Amino acid sequence: MLSALLGPDAQRRRLLKKAPAGAMREYLATPFPDRRSDIYSVPIVSVDFETTGLDSKADRILSIGHVDLSGGEILLGSAAHTIIQPDTSLSEESVVIHRITDDEAAFGKPLETSIAALLEALAGKVMLAHHAAIERGFLQQVCRQVYGLAPVVPVIDTLSLARKWLARRNKEVEQGALRLYALRERYDLPRYNAHNALSDALATAELFLAQVEHMDSSKPPTLGNLLS
């Protein structure tokens, strides 16, 4: 496919030509950060989705959490947590795991409105996530449904960074060792409650800053070195 041969910014410009007016067009109209940039000069958004499962085609987004990073700091004033208004009642399992009741969900925001807000937050920035294939997959699937196309999304994945770190040191990856909270323990970061989108977005942001701080380099890595 042609898109596989193009870089992210070239893909962005190509998709822009057929993007509908609104949040998708505005997102694609904004250039991505330069891959050669010092990572601390790159605007980043840490994102987490709580979902009913891992299949972006069959499962649904329950909530979205995100927070900005800039200059090696987490901008807590940018933190946002959105509960999505479901199209069907939540299963008992989802309520137990995610602690989102039907009553809370009933006052949630429509998925289309919430995805538009997320695209606005991501414009001109890089998305950060743990096991980022999930967030990118759900975001692209919803965008196909709402806008008729899936945007290119530059991503940094803290799980991928951890796997590479272990591989360089010939360390065996034990079961569960790459989970978000197991990795945070490696850097003596505090334990937060799981299955809350904003809490996990903040936890991922903290983990990422710790990973960068402990990289084997005399200077901060470039964005290109960290992209998935």
Image: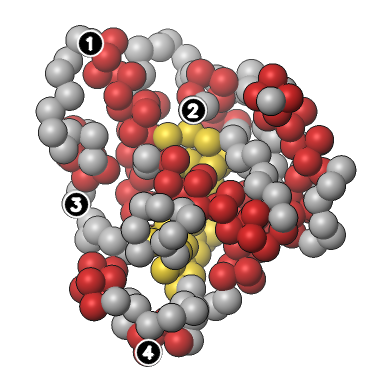
Q: Residues within 10 Å of mark 1 (few under 14, many from 20)?
A: few
Residue 48 visible in this rendered orientation of the protein: no
Q: Earlier in the sequence, mark 1 or mark 4?
A: 4
Q: Distance from label 1 to label 3 (Cα)?
A: 26 Å
Q: Are marks 1 and 3 in contact (CB under 8 Å)?
A: no
Q: Distance from label 4 to label 3 (Cα)?
A: 28 Å
The residue carrying mark 1 is: 169
Q: Nearer the viewer, mark 1 or mark 3?
A: 1
- Any mark on residue 228, and which? 2
Residue type at mark 1: give it: Arg
Secondary structure beneath label 2? loop
Q: Residue at x 84, y 47 (%)?
A: 18
Q: Earlier in the sequence, mark 4 or mark 3?
A: 4
Q: Nearer the viewer, residue 28 or 66?
A: 28
The residue carrying mark 3 is: 191
| As drawn, 75 above or below 93 | above
Residue type at mark 3: give it: Arg
Q: Distance from label 3 to label 2 (Cα)?
A: 26 Å
Residue 192 visible in this rendered orientation of the protein: yes
Q: Residue at x 35, y 12 (%)?
A: 216
Residue type at mark 4: give it: Asp
Q: Distance from label 1 to label 2 (Cα)?
A: 20 Å
Q: Residue at x 42, y 11 (%)?
A: 218
